[in-house]
Amino acid sequence: MPSYLFKRILTMIPTLIVISILVFVIIQLPPGDYLESHIAELESQGESIDPQQIEFLRHEYGLDKPIWEQYLIWITGFVQGDLGYSFEYNLPVADVIGDKMWLTIIVSFFTILITWLIAFPIGMYSATHPYSWGDYGLTFLGFLGLATPNFLLALIMMYLANQYFGTSIGGLMDSEYIDQPWSWEKFKSVLAHLWIPVLVIGTSGTAGMIRRLRANLLDELRKPYVVTARAKGMGELKLLTKYPLRISLNFFIADIGSLLPSVISGAEVVAVVLSLPTTGPILLAALQSQDMYLAGSFLMFLAILTVFGVLVSDIALAMLDPRIRLQGGIKK
Amino acid sequence: MNKHWVSDKPFNPYATDELTAAQQKYFLASQWTLIWWKFKKHKVAMFCAFLLIAIYLIAAFAEFFAPYSLQHRHTQKIYSPPQEVHFFEDGKLTRPFVYGWSYTLNLEILLREYEEDKSQKYPLKFFCQGDDYQLWGALNASSHLVCVDSPGSLFLLGTDRLGHDMLSRIIYGARISLTIGLIGIILSFTLGLTLGGLAGFYGGWIDSSVQRLTEIIRSFPELPLWMALSALLPLSWSPMWIFFGITLILAMMDWTGLARAVRAKILTLREEDYTSAALLMGATPARVIKKHMLPSFFSHLIASASLSIPAMILGETALSFLGLGLRPPITSWGVLLNEAQNINNVAVYPWLMMPVVPVIIVILAFNFLGDGLRDAADPYTH
């Protein structure tokens, strides 16, 4: 196990390095830099700018250096916790991101939790009652959840809430807690607002999960050992929980890896629609205004979050299933 | 007085081995015929296939099916709610018609309030002459499926901010939204097949670099990456280039799943005897892959491709919705929904959300179709 863990973490490092290069290239690609567009904007408003100040800024942020040097400055700063400076907000990136990153993590965590809680019993029911009306109904619901893009679902929910309850369901906490330090009250307020984005973001993932659990469990239930156990008179519940369920649990864990990117993607758009104070709206604005350090740090954070999510799921899987951690040992 | 009846037909000792006509038909059928038979049994998938063909036909002949042309602005009928089509007049069934449609400005809430003018009646005409258009930019015509006479108007789904008919815009939008899925899938199919095939067949460093590449792309949250990439497209590009740019971005991120599937299949098929036989006889790798390996899993690939078309359509919709994808004057479903982004707008003009309906229908249909195809893809298992 330790050797597996070590190898797994080691392979993560080159992945992260390539991702960081990719992110940097992406945020650098548009012609010009933020200062240029900033100057143009100020000039169009008739304001004059001190060329010395511009020169100072350009030097300060290393915008006059060759591109690979800029990358090195950015990435070493990033590793040391200095995320650079947001031109748009005139604040260090760390201050802009602040608890928004935490809110994104909280939303993603609860979304995955809810996805499991909903998908598990439904998938089990569908697999144990295949081709029944309940199964068909749930399958259709699942497809509907899969087909409805979550930002549209957010829009529809907003409209319905507005139409029938007369309330706005946007935001992630009551307005008096915005910009307040974290407290128990604030946390409770966040929890109370959390369920709508969590449900909205979770639908498509839940639908996919139900379908995969159903397929996996169905395959497992058709295997000869299940028939044998049934022939020997084992009770249906024990028959289900003893092996088939445990085997199909594996992929539940493995799915965090594929679930997390889609949850984060969903969270970003839904956040824009529901105007949640998570990273979504800021990322969108940063990308549009070429606020490169802010956009870059965001993308990097989201990617790191995903890579770590996959790592956690791999480790959990290795602990659950000895076949996986032994695989590496036999080959080499 | 024999008690036993004996057939006087000649005795055929091989009768049990001979095939009935039905069996013979089944055993001699080609793989694709078998797939077709199995697919036909999947009623929902069949229905969805016809539905999609119909929708694509409507998109192809958008000019004919849309009641109005894309440029036609009804400046006197801005933000009109959907009009009702009437079938009964004084309790009697007549040909469908709409009443006259006019608004009064409510100065208190500053909204136009539309009302039916029962004194005017405009029957719906089918295959009638309406706005002029050029079909596919070449054929001059002015036939429309349905329209009403001039002072009357037919807004089945209402009008938007500029007085465009929503139904017409949705039909025109289908053309862009649906082709993005098709072009995108062709690109990602080619990429996935080539890279996955190379990785699986040659192994070694090609395999591991392709593997790493797919790993990295997959570990990115898709949408933020799409957002970042499409923010790169210069604003000065013409709408056509933006369209291709967006398609390319969607395809570049989508091929990984297919590449993995192809690689896994080819890895196992490479060990088959018939593969080594073909290679020993001097067949080139390209021929071996094309002639000997592909046929055994091509049907699976088509099934999985049909499942990733909806993801692309959704991708375009999401990007355009956020204002990062296609922009007006291009009309796509995402662009239409972009106008519904503001919740206050939607609360007052709920019909702006109508493009949600075709998006959901198309995605659902593709999913069911893909499900049916996947079941049919392997006709030899029961």
Image: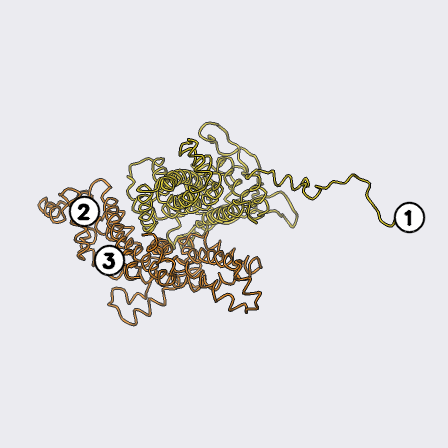
Q: Position of residue A57 (x, y in %)?
A: 12, 48
Figure colour of chain A: orange
Which chain did the image draw in yellow? B
User: Does residue A68 sit above or below A148 in this rendering?
Assistant: above
The residue labelled by disc 1 is B1
Foreground residue, A8 or B141? Answer: A8
Task: Evaluate whether label 1 is on the same chain as label 3.
Answer: no
Q: Position of residue A294 (x, y in %)?
A: 23, 52
Of residue B358 and residue A101, the one placed in the foreground of this image is A101
Distance from disc 1 to disc 3, alpha carbons, whole Å, reads 104 Å
- Residue A97 — which label? 3
Mark 1 belongs to which subunit?
Answer: B
Secondary element type, mark 3: helix
Q: Nearer the viewer, mark 1 or mark 3?
A: 1
Query: Alpha-carbon neighbours of circle 2 within 10 Å: few (<14), some, or many (≥20)?
Result: some
| Mark 2 chain | A
Q: Which residue is mark 2?
A: A71
Q: CA distance from mark 1 to mark 2?
A: 107 Å
